[in-house]
Image (spheres, rainbow, N blue to C red):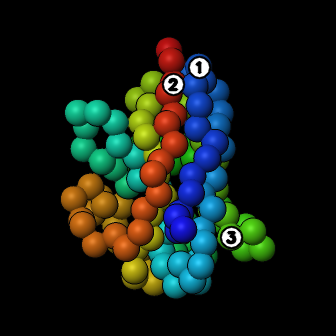
Amino acid sequence: QDQLVESGGGSVQAGGSLRLSCAVFGYIWDNYCLVWIRQSPGKEREGVATFDLYGRPGYVDSVKGRFTVSKDNAKQILYLQMDNLKPEDTANYYCAADPGRLCRPLADYAYWDGLSYRGKGTQVTVSS
């Protein structure tokens, strides 16, 4: 069974909005920091947002004020609300589980290979 399953991607024009969902199965919900990561062809992967086990969100500077990460504990779904989207936000977005109770600095997720689980991702395409 897939542990993390994303949905909600699509194609929008610049300035539009999308809400991504990540269904989290099993014990991951209560035991791992959850991370949204994005990657596009030819670019380094980038940690976009985190949500640690203490309920604290974190964002990379490029999305602050535009993206909001949240959790639905009853449904075990991690959300990423993305507003005022820009063409540079175009990427495959996936959620992942960091085994730490505290999330790592977002810059670390560009190269750190310690993630325990990740989903297949959902494509977001923003046109100008």
Q: Judge from the rendering whether residue 33 lies leftward or rightward of residue 19; answer left or right.
A: left
- Element carrying mark 2: strand
Q: Is residue 53 visible?
A: no
Query: Residues at badges 3 and 2 in contact (C-beta under 8 Å)?
Result: no
Give the numbered dot on residue 76. 3
- Element carrying mark 3: loop
The crowd level at tag 1 (other Cα within 10 Å; few <14, some 14-19, many 20+) is: some
Compare marks 3 and 1 and give the one earlier in the sequence. 1
Which residue is pictured at 45% across the width and 51% down the height? 120
- Could you say which is closer to the camera, residue 4 or residue 89? 4
Please state, as top left, top right, bottom left or bottom right, where the N terminus lies in the image. Answer: bottom right
Give the numbered dot on residue 60. none
Q: Which residue is the site of mark 2?
A: 126
Which residue is pictured at 61% across the width and 47% down the height? 7
Q: Check the image and name the residue furthest to the top.
A: 128
Q: Which residue is the site of mark 1?
A: 13
